[in-house]
Amino acid sequence: MLKISASATPGLSLSALARALVITVLLFQSALSLAKSESLDPPANPAAYQWDFSMIYASWEAWEAGMAEMKGKVSEYVALKGTLEQGPAAILKAYQLSDEIGRLSYLTYRYPGLQRDIDQRDQSISGRFQQVQAAFAQMDTSTAWFTPELLLIPEQKMIQWIDTTPALAPYRYPILDTYRQKAHVLDETGERLLSYSGQFKRTPSAIYEALSTADIDFPEVTLTTGETLRMTSGAYRRTLETAREQADRQAAFEAHYGTYAATKNTYAAIYNSILQRDWYDARSRDYPSTLASSLDSDAVPLVVYTNLVQAVRAGTEPLKRYQTLRKKILKLDEYHLYDDALPLLDAAVDYPYAQAREMVVDSVLPLGTAYQTQLRDFLNSRAVDVYESAGKRSGAYVAGVYGVGPYMLLNYNDTLDAVFTLAHESGHAMHTNLSYANQPFATASYTIFVAEVASTTNERFLLEKLLNESDNPAERFLLLQKAIENIAGTFYAQVSFADYELQAHQRAEQGEPITAEVLTTICRDISRAYQSKEVTEDALYDNLWARIPHFYNSPYYVYKYATCFASSAALYNAMTTGTEAEQAAAKERYLTLLRSGGDDLPMAQLKKAGVDLSKPEAIQAVIQQMDDLVSRLEVEAVNLGLIAAVDVTPDS
């Protein structure tokens, strides 16, 4: 999953850091709930494949000392209130103290947070984690004075101070980006007042989590095999992926989606509170829309978002071709969206972790031996927790700890999907390592807007290496299907979600009613735009909006999956086509991007690397890639005898 680290938000980012680390938890939960594993008999996790927390703190006593030190430094920081106008030395003192607190924040947050993810049954660790959260909430309020006071200093005077004070150079970008957002910063009283609402504004997400996890009661379904399953998220996904009888997939779908539909009015009320909260936040800072408010932190032009939605809507033909091909290969009279997850071929190949590790390391050789060696050393370290174990959080992620390095959580299970997950997370780990090694603390954390570039680029290197080396038609077919499903899920699906979020927020901004019927209608219209004419509609599917945690935990986030995917596709093409000199230059630009952390606006960072998301070429490249992959899959399907011939008739 995507890597989230401490915020690179402009200004003295103590409160932003606190918010970012809390958001980490929300996004981890949201992504993992969609991929929840329900392994009944997880393999043992040998010590050599478990995390070593002593790299952060040697003991809980050391952690408690770190907490005390952090709180003391926050008090020192609060005492600086009213001093910033004294000159560059006062500004420097505040920022350096901010760095010290920021480093301690990483350590004190990650030490209990990572351990909690390894054993969620241990309530003592959960209690310590709550201590950190409470400290961060206090930090948010205590630091609300800084940005308003900073902005009382004229921008030109601040630039002069930076130019004549070399020690302020690491803070140039964060400081000046704060001035960029000056029009949306309130005075001290206003900022403090908004800070008081922080926990309250997280309440809708907490209610959603309680309703959709703790209080949800999925029904049992008896499959045609005689097996009875409670149709939880994990069981539902597993049934769609393994049940060869369409009737079983239909029963699973109706039971799972029907559960959300039964309380859709409650979900709609919760989502309406999210929309109203976002509109309140936007108006309180004088933004014209919720989208403008969300995009401004990264200075992303609105047209990037709206053009993405429009271009992908217009470029759905390859996705529709794939759905049509699936119907033909599966020999179904009717094709439903619950048929999308069923593998077209049964895979019988296991990939032990040691083999997968070498496959991933070998695949990144084009990025240079130094990159390759650093990745191998990381994957052989105890910063990777590899296997499932009792009480361990499901899914996969990378979490950075500044001054220590990245920690990678996996639940490796020897499948091809697990190999690609390892490649994906390895990209995040190397991005973090290179950022930390080449940036001061103030600009070491890259934004979410560029976070998925490294991960999806590594997946592409792995895919192309395996395709180039394989002469087995069945293996090539599975690899191509994997690549197509990745684009379908990471690009097309996320843009359709972004389309939904924009339409729902716009209705709230216009004062229109937000009901279950309204939200269902939005979903239905978008779904029709993305579906092949061969797909039979199911009304229950229109309740999709109720079961996507990102909508409730992190609005306007999902589009970044698509922009990152488009960026990585463009960068990969530049690194693998053209003359040898052109490829070498493209690789160096890419590595420079990974080293740059958060030292500039993300759109500017990508542009330096060779991707201009304000233009349509990057988006069109992914659509073309999808088209090429589907064409290659059609050829392999003919070679395997799965279809007689390729149908070139357009779907729409």
Image (tube, helix red, strand yellow):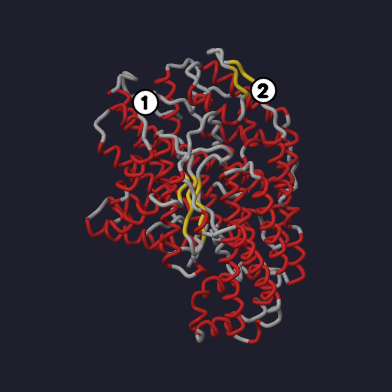
Residue 617 seen in the figure: no
Mark 2 or 1, nearer chain start? 2
Q: Amino acid at mark 1?
A: Ala
Please indicate whether residue 468 sits to the left or right of residue 50 in the image: left
Residue 344 seen in the figure: yes
Q: CA distance from mark 2 to mark 1?
A: 31 Å
**Which residue is located at x 63 percent, y 27 percent?**
257
- Which is in the foreground here, disc 2 or disc 1? 1
Q: Amino acid at mark 2?
A: Pro
Task: Look at the picture and state if 132 lies above or below 228.
Answer: below
Disc 1 secondary structure class: loop
From the viewer's side, name the closer residue of 590 and 536. 590
**Which residue is located at x 38 percent, y 44 percent?**
459
Disc 2 secondary structure class: loop
**Which residue is located at x 74 percent, y 48 percent?**
203
Number of numbered labels in the structure image: 2
Tell me the crowding category of disc 1: few under 14, some 14 to 19, or many 20 or more residues within 10 angstroms, Cα based: few
Task: Look at the picture and state if 412 lies above or below 15.
Answer: above
Tell me the crowding category of disc 2: few under 14, some 14 to 19, or many 20 or more residues within 10 angstroms, Cα based: some
Write down the residue under mark 1: 348
Task: Look at the picture and state if 368 lies above or below 324.
Answer: below
Q: Which mark is residue 397?
A: none
Please indicate whether residue 359 sits to the left or right of residue 183 in the image: left
Q: Which mark is residue 219?
A: 2
Image location of residue 103, percent across then percent down: 56, 66
Task: Look at the picture and state if 372 lies above or below 193.
Answer: above
Image location of residue 234, percent across then percent down: 57, 31
